[in-house]
Amino acid sequence: MDKVIITGGKRLKGEVEISGAKNSALPIIASSILSTEECILKNVPLLKDIQTIQRLLECMGARIQRDGYTLNVNAKDLKSCEAPYELVKTMRASVLVLGPLVARFGEARVSLPGGCAIGTRPINLHIAGLQRMGAEVEIKHGYVEVRAKRLKGAKIYFDISTVTGTENLMMAAVLAEGVTVLGNAACEPEVVDLANFLIKRGARIQGAGTDTIIIEGVSKIRGDSYEVMPDRIEAGTYLVCGAITGGDVTVSRCIPSHLDAVLMKLGAAGIKTEVSSDSVRVIADNGISAVDVRTMPYPGFPTDMQAQIMALMAVSRGLSVITETVFENRYIHVPELRRMGANIKLQGNDAIVEGVKKLSGAPVMATDLRASASLVVAGLVAEGKTEIQRIYHLDRGYERLEEKLSRLGADIVRVS
């Protein structure tokens, strides 16, 4: 099994280009199921999660071709409405095929999802929404089985904000009979990206990016081409990498407005930032001050950046409190950061981080995607070598990580 070895202490400097957003590409690829026409998707990142959803659609009968960063997806001859456990268990986002399958074929059989162990993340809100739209749902032998002759528009209110739930039901609603209203909908940019692609294909959607999305069902939607937006979490991660090393790093091909909450916290920590139309430069030449962070649904501070900002706070001046409000089990990276000398105490949903002067390299184990990123961030500034094992988690969400960091001056290698 591969591992990453980082020799810390190198100041990062230079420019890094951001890849397409994983969490946009996954629902956009799933939405190709809705049409019998080909979808041409551009700026699709080369990631394990993308390979997983590609294999999932192919096992159902879709024809997919990749040419560099472009995917040609044709779901015309889909012959199966089942998403098997063998694939769904590796990635929770596989459940995104549920809504499109029911919308187009009137049935779906999807394994209950797996993925990162960062919380229970049940799909009960997806199921309740489909039932409101007239579907019959059974859970048998670890599978969700859904049937509906044709879904009907309905008013649906999410008890808690859910990105995949919003995306799944939005895709289901585009072919439903009548109007569907999604209340307390997720406002994340990835939801907007999916909506924009669906609208381009003939869907009638209003309000994406707000907490109320209105979908007027149509009889069919077509295929089309679309470019996936840049990955805001990858961009935020490289900004933190630059900051923790006292570096001067420009993150290009990004959407700075998607990073507002992250940039505010970096500014409060004494990190200088320069923002242009499609890039952010971070200049860290005056140390790092402690700041408190509370994760929230967008436009709040993203839970997917919590582990990385914790690594930054581990070497800050002072005491910071990081509060996780989105997932109930997202501090599993803390023991690994402690192995590197971080002073972190957990009290319920709060992580109390007292900055230390230095971290020390150590063998550590990645436990989920963003936890992996936090260990990379810490390793860049730690004295000596940090060996990160189980890096297949990193490969799920960061494209060519070692190459990009090496170009910025990091001493990082992947070994088998």
Image: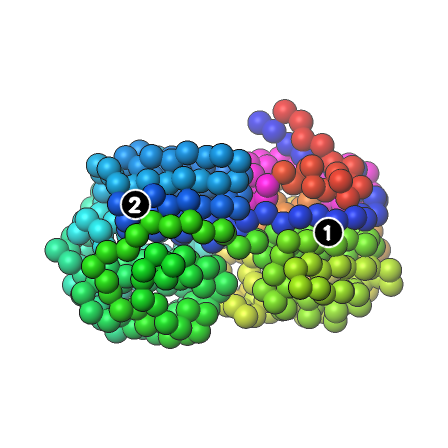
Q: Is 91 in the magenta?
A: no
Q: Is 386 in the magenta?
A: yes
Give percent across and percent down for residue 71: 44, 40
From this view, report whether residue 249 is shown above or below residue 179: above
Query: In front here: 65 or 311?
Result: 65
Query: In front here: 225 or 406?
Result: 225
Query: In front here: 89 or 30?
Result: 30
**Quarter of the rendering occupied by the C terminus:** top right
Q: Residues within 10 Å of mark 2 (few under 14, many from 20)?
A: some
Image-based side of 271 in relation to 336, left or right: right
| Rendered residue at 40%/39% (across/down) | 72
Give percent across and percent down for residue 306: 61, 59
Q: Residues within 10 Å of mark 1 (few under 14, many from 20)?
A: many
Which residue was labeled with disc 1? 241
Q: Secondary structure at mark 1?
A: helix
Q: Amino acid at mark 2?
A: Glu
Q: Amino acid at mark 1?
A: Cys
Segment colored magenta: 378-399
| Rendered residue at 53%/55% (across/down) | 229
Residue 89 at least partly seen = no
| Rendered residue at 71%/64% (across/down) | 276
Q: Residue furthest left?
A: 149
The quadrant holding residue 58 is: top left
Give percent across and percent down for residue 361: 76, 41
Which residue was labeled with disc 2? 37
